[in-house]
């Protein structure tokens, strides 16, 4: 479903930074994969490349049969809106919109605002344990609740691919565990593919497989202990 072939990416800037050199990796449809690795190694950049938010310097990225080298920015935006969902570390919940409107944002962007959209929003709020909270303002919710809103929003338009960047970064261990379990269960239920970048041991363990991103490429992470070592910081 996702294929990166010989992808290179460097950042210019005051201190130029070479992140990937001919990086190759692929992910199957329906997989739920954790990406671990040291801070600054390029996990967020990798997710941004897969999302088409950033361009590779060279190499090929093909997602769901779409070759990014053949796409202009509008095509990538359309691809993102229809087929992808995101969960960000910092929630990115819009404070001036109600909880329900936040969850429904991907549907609005697709021009879907009718009764069916309302039903779907209610269904997603129920699924994340926030049924009846749709009219609340985000300021009235806890950190864990906001992250659940973010998960509902990432899945509301039934994306084929869900990308999550440190989805438990701001949460205490108990909330983090809940959110991880919910994210995994939601992705499964929607039969989506999930890629999650994380420092959390629990999040890495919850995945079908974990990969460690290093300066030279990906390494599989085999055992739970190796996951612990690779994740570095642990929430447990
Ligand atoms: N727009 C940019 N311009 C210049 N350098 C950048 C830019 N974005 C990221 N970098 C650099 O690229 C490197 C990788 O960043 P990235 O955010 O992908 O790391 P990460 O693995 O997600 O780290 P963390 O675990 O801390 O979130 C960092 O050294 C960062 O400073
Ligand atoms: Mg990051």
Image (cartoon, rainbow, N blue to C red):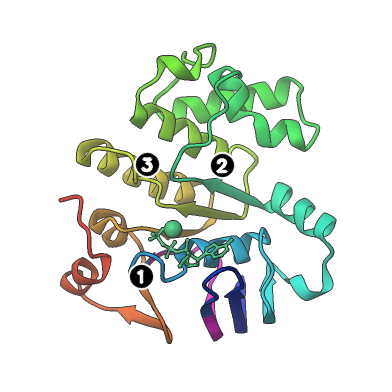
Residue 215 horizontal side relative to residue 50, left or right: left
Q: CA distance from mark 3 to mark 2?
A: 12 Å
Magenta-span inclusion, residue 23: yes
Q: Which residues are magenta?
A: 20-35
Q: Is residue 24 above or below residue 66?
A: below
At horizontal 15% and vertical 51% (from top left) the residue drawn is 236
Residue 157 versus residue 214: which sits nearer the camera? 214
| Neighbours of disc 1 within 10 Å: few (<14), some (14-19), many (20+) | some
Q: Could you tell me if the residues under marks 3 and 1 are in contact, i.e. CB atoms within 8 Å?
A: no
Q: Could you tell me if the residues under marks 2 and 1 are in contact, i.e. CB atoms within 8 Å?
A: no
Give the mark nearest the N terminus, 2 or 1: 2
Magenta-span inclusion, residue 53: no
Q: CA distance from mark 3 to mark 1?
A: 18 Å
Q: CA distance from mark 2 to mark 1?
A: 21 Å
The prevailing secondary structure element of the residues shown in magenta is strand
Tag on residue 38? Answer: none
Q: Which residue is mark 3?
A: 182
Q: Which residue is mark 1?
A: 209
Element type at marker 2?
helix
Q: Which residue is mark 2?
A: 155
Q: Could you tell me if the residues under marks 3 and 2 are in contact, i.e. CB atoms within 8 Å?
A: no
For ligand 2, which image quadrant applies?
bottom left
């Amino acid at each position: 479903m996702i294929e990166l072939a010989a992808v290179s990416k460097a950042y210019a800037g005051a201190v130029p930074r070479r992140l990937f050199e001919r990086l190759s990796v692929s992910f199957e449809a329906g997989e739920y994969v954790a990406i671990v690795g040291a801070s600054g190694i390029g996990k967020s950049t990798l997710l941004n490349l897969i999302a088409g938010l950033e361009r590779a310097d060279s190499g090929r990225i093909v997602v769901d049969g779409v070759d990014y080298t053949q796409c202009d920015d509008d095509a990538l935006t359309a691809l993102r809106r229809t087929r992808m969902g995101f969960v960000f570390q910092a929630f990115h919940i819009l404070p001036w919109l109600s909880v329900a409107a936040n969850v429904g944002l991907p549907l609005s962007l697709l021009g879907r605002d009718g009764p069916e959209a309302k039903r779907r929003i209610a269904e997603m709020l129920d699924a994340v344990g926030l049924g009846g909270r749709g009219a609340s303002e985000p300021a009235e919710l806890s950190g864990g609740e906001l992250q659940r809103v973010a998960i509902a929003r990432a899945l509301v338009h039934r994306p084929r691919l869900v990308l999550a960047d440190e989805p438990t970064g701001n949460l205490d261990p108990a909330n983090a565990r809940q959110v991880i379990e919910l994210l995994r269960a939601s992705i499964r239920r929607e039969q989506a593919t999930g890629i999650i970048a994380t420092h959390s041991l629990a999040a890495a363990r919850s995945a079908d497989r974990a990969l460690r991103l290093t300066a030279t490429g990906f390494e599989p992470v085999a055992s739970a202990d190796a996951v612990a070592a690779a994740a570095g910081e642990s929430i447990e």
